[in-house]
Image: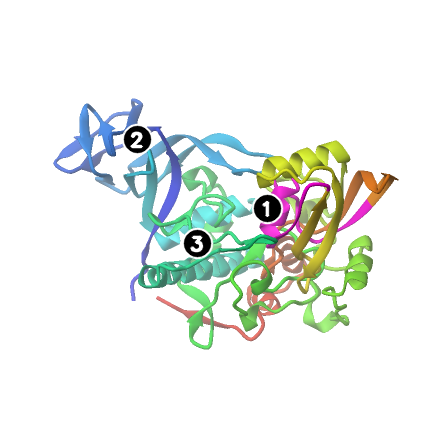
């Protein structure tokens, strides 16, 4: 079986600007210039070089040809969001959608993975850690391609459950109709040729060529996050209510050192865990290890295993109104309703002087309680300076960075440094899964 091609959504806007280096063909035409081109949305079509098109496909004439997309947004909605010019190999497709033009990079899966590994990790990472990540990045991608095929058959896929008292939403596949995956943290970081700077990244992909994780003969939906906070989360608490046995919750400690896992769905137990700093793989300050996982912009985040955020009453009430679209008035309380196995909040009741509503799941909670995203939804709340029943400040004490499901990148990097093989790392985080060669 040959490897597939992947369609990656890179950037969209009213106008997209790009360069080419080499020669490309589109239709019966050819481009061979290093000058800047622009593509615009016009009357439901694509405007390029004085002509209107329903779609455009630029194909490289040879393997050396590359293109550069200007002002690609990376870290969308995160505190380090910025624009970057990025170079890509493969094909460039442009489609019109919802008043904008969308740029899509089409390339072989293995070439895509070399950039993902380099974009997610730094050049200093251990080979075994990179190989583990190559397998899960490949598995996740192929699982999403399969899922997209199913969504075309079952278009009723829903990610929102709401009524007068609750708004529960998860963020996954609903907004990627034109391509397989996006290029940002919502899916997997993919920053094209700009990030392929490590021979080890290429080696990790080549040495695991075609390898994926499966469970019961199905491709595993292999999720990962920066730091689980000491215990990994289960899939159903973050996305659709489907349990995947290979994504069980477990302490971020190798199997030969396992501890009894506390029940973090119980509020008191979650509070004790989050306020403590247990000795787990991802509880590290080793600069060498952290540099393997945290690229330059990630290092702007200094505390992630345990962290704190404090809001005044005015700041929090204004923030919740802005991010949720509802005026809760003054915030009286934030009440945990349901927690997952890692202590992450799945449902949180916001009680205000004007309204009360329960929100979820974890990313919606993180989104509403921050100008960007809280590091995770595994947090406890301390209310201070209470006047006439109204707290004047709220302090969030939290654990971890990201959703916590599947592989913990910092924990896996620590395992790699300690000499664990990539298969040992994979079988630690994805219990009872198998490694097979897909092609």
**Residue for badge 3:** 173
Residue placed most toward the observer, 159 or 254 = 159
Q: Is residue 378 magenta?
A: yes
Determine the CA span between mark 3 and mark 2. 33 Å
Determine if the magenta segment contains residue 83: no
How many numbered markers are drawn? 3
Q: Is residue 355 above or below residue 345?
A: above
Whichever of labels 3 and 2 marks the residue nearer the N terminus, that label is 2
Q: Tell me residue 362's x, y (percent).
A: 61, 53
Whether 367 is drawn above or below 40: the answer is below
Task: Please identify the quadrant where the C terminus is shown.
Answer: bottom left
Which mark, residue 226? Answer: none
Q: Which colouring convention does the figure follow?
A: rainbow
Q: Which residue is mark 2?
A: 21
Q: Tell me, yes or no, whether the two marked residues, 1 and 3, touch with CB atoms within 8 Å.
A: no
Element assignment for label 1: loop
Residue at 39% from the left image edge and 49% from the top image edge: 176
For this rendering, which residue is in front, 313 or 67? 313
Q: Position of residue 143 (x, y in %)?
A: 42, 62
1 or 2: tag closer to the N-terminus? 2
Say which residue label 1 marks. 124
Residue at 24% across, 30% down: 43
Position in image of residue 420 (x %, y %): 63, 64
Residues drawn in magenta: 353-382
Q: Secondary structure at mark 3?
A: loop
Q: Is residue 366 visible?
A: yes
Q: Give the camera-side residue of 378 and 211.
A: 378
Distance CA(mark 1)–CA(mark 2): 29 Å
The nearer-to-camera label among 3 and 2 is 3
Q: Please give the name of the residue rendered at 77% of the width and 61% of the height, measured from the top-left corner.
A: 267
């Amino acid at each position: 079986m040959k490897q597939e091609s992947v369609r990656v959504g890179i950037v969209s806007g009213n106008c997209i600007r790009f360069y080419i280096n080499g020669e490309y063909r589109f239709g019966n035409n050819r481009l061979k210039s290093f000058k800047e081109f622009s593509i615009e949305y016009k009357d439901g079509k694509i405007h390029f070089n004085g002509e209107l098109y329903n779609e455009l496909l630029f194909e490289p004439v040879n393997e050396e040809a590359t293109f550069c997309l200007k002002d690609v947004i990376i870290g969308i909605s995160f505190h380090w969001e910025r624009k970057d010019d990025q170079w890509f190999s493969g094909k460039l497709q442009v489609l019109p959608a919802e008043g904008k033009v969308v740029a899509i990079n089409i390339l072989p899966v293995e070439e895509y993975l070399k950039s993902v590994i380099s974009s997610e990790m730094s050049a200093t990472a251990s080979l075994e850690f990179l190989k583990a990540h190559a397998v899960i990045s490949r598995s996740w991608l192929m699982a999403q391609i399969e899922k997209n095929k199913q969504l075309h058959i079952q278009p009723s896929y829903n990610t929102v459950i709401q009524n007068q008292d609750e708004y529960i939403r998860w963020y996954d596949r609903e907004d990627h109709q034109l391509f397989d995956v996006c290029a940002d943290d919502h899916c997997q970081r993919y920053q094209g040729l700009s990030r392929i700077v490590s021979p080890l990244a290429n080696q990790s992909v080549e040495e695991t060529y075609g390898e994926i994780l499966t469970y019961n003969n199905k491709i595993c939906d292999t999720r990962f996050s920066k730091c689980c906070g000491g215990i990994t989360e289960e899939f159903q608490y973050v996305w659709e209510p489907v349990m995947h046995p290979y994504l069980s919750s477990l302490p971020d400690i190798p199997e030969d050192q396992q501890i009894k896992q506390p029940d973090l769905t119980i509020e008191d137990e979650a509070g004790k865990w989050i306020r403590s700093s247990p000795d787990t793989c991802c509880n590290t300050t080793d600069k060498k290890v952290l540099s393997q996982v945290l690229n330059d912009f990630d290092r702007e985040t200094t505390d992630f295993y345990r962290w704190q955020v404090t809001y005044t009453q005015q700041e929090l009430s204004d923030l919740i109104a802005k991010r949720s679209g509802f005026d809760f008035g003054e915030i009286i309380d934030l009440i945990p309703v349901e927690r997952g196995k890692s202590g992450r909040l799945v449902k949180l009741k916001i009680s205000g002087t004007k309204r009360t509503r329960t929100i979820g799941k974890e990313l919606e909670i993180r989104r509403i309680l921050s100008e960007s995203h809280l590091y995770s939804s595994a947090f406890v709340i301390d209310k201070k300076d209470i006047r006439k029943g109204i707290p004047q400040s709220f302090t969030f004490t939290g654990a971890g960075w990201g959703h916590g499901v599947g592989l913990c990148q910092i924990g896996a990097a620590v395992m790699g440094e300690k000499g664990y093989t990539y298969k040992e790392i994979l079988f630690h985080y994805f219990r009872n899964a198998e490694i097979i060669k897909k092609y």
